[in-house]
Amino acid sequence: MKIQPLRDRVVVRPLKAKEKTRGGIVLPDTAKEKPQEGEIVAVGKGKVLEGGKIRSLEVKVGDRVLYGKYGGTEIKTKEGEEWLIMGEDEIYAVMK
């Protein structure tokens, strides 16, 4: 599925939730936490400033990012994948 976010929005593919704890306990679906880490799949053209200029985004496709637990809007692709659309300001950090 091709999707092009507008302005300063990005599309993020969340990483899978952890299946086990560090101690080896298998977690049921109801106990898994929402992931807060994902990979940028698509980016918009940038933020429109007051003078009409466009400031490009600091993130790019392929970046691994951290975001808020309840950030973004969930969408489902034709293939059944769950992605998030969020503003650049909802991203807390880029992991290097």
Image (cartoon, rainbow, N blue to C red):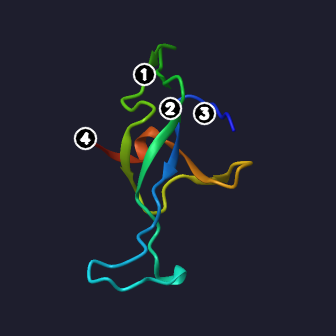
Label pair 2/1, CB-CB below 8 angstroms = no
Q: Kindly indicate the quadrant of the structure image that contains residue 35.
A: bottom left
Q: Please report whichever mark, 1 or 4, sits nearer to the chain's N-terminal start.
A: 1
- Point out residue 48 in the picture as x, y percentages from the top left corner: 50, 22
Q: Kindly indicate the quadrant of the structure image that contains residue 95.
A: top left
Question: Where is mark 1, residue-wise?
Answer: 56
Q: Which mark is residue 8?
A: 2
Question: Where is mark 3, residue-wise?
Answer: 5
Dot in front, 2 or 3: 3
Q: Marks 1/4: CA distance? A: 20 Å
Dot in front, 1 or 4: 4
Q: Please report whichever mark, 3 or 1, sits nearer to the chain's N-terminal start.
A: 3
Q: Kindly indicate the quadrant of the structure image that contains residue 4.
A: top right
* Label 2 element class: loop
Q: Nearer the viewer, residue 28 or 56?
A: 28
Label pair 3/1, CB-CB below 8 angstroms = no
